[in-house]
Image (cartoon, helix red, strand yellow):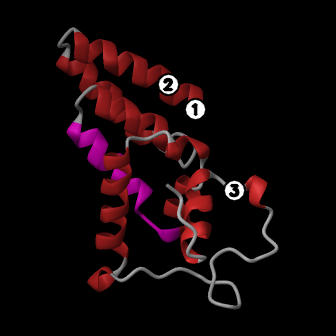
Amino acid sequence: ELKFAQFWGQLLAAADKYCVDDLASLCAERMVQRLSIWSAISMLESACLASQQGLKRDVINFITLSPHIFSSIRDMADYDSLDENLRGEIVDAFVEKQLPGGKRRRSLEPGGREFADGQDWARLSRAQLRRACGERGVATR
């Protein structure tokens, strides 16, 4: 899936660079057809680089489709490499779409924490580590 996304993303970038709108539309269409948890970040980066707002919107809609998809993608290492503003846009879309009134809900471990004290910290992504530190009142910057 990732190689597929990278191929179509490179073709999309070339189509955008040389103003071949029909090819850019075809690339965006094919990318949306094969959108998955594993390809979403790569496709989102390609959409942003090629200024394809429709594709960007479609990928963000997929990422925020359900809490499971959102958390799966958010916990990937590639998610941390996204621009901070883009990550904020994704979170805002998720909150607006999934949570009436903008209140954040998450499944908590006993004791009111998302991450248990016995958690294997080395296996967590940076996003997960920031949330774990935040719920313990530890500054991350």
Query: Is 60 left, or right, of 115 in this rendering?
Result: left
- The residue tagged 2 is 6
Name the mark on residue 110: none
Q: CA distance from mark 3 to mark 1?
A: 22 Å
Query: Which dot, 2 or 3, sits closer to the camera?
Result: 3
Q: Secondary structure at mark 2?
A: helix
Earlier in the chain: of badge 3 and badge 1, it is 1
Q: Residues within 10 Å of mark 1 (few under 14, many from 20)?
A: some
Q: CA distance from mark 2 to mark 3?
A: 25 Å
Name the mark on residue 124: 3
Magenta stretch containing residue 40, yes or no? no
Three-letter residue code for mark 3: Leu
Q: Residues within 10 Å of mark 2 (few under 14, many from 20)?
A: some
For image coordinates 46% across by 68% down, the residue present is 66
Q: CA distance from mark 1 to mark 2?
A: 6 Å
Residue 16 percent coordinates (x, y) = 24, 18
Three-letter residue code for mark 2: Gln
Three-letter residue code for mark 1: Leu
**Quarter placement of the N terminus:** top right
Which of the 4 image quadrants contains residue 133? bottom right
- The residue tagged 1 is 2
- Magenta portion: prevailing SS class: helix
For image coordinates 49% across by 61% down, the residue present is 70
Q: Are marks 2 and 3 in contact (CB under 8 Å)?
A: no
Q: Which residues are magenta?
A: 53-67
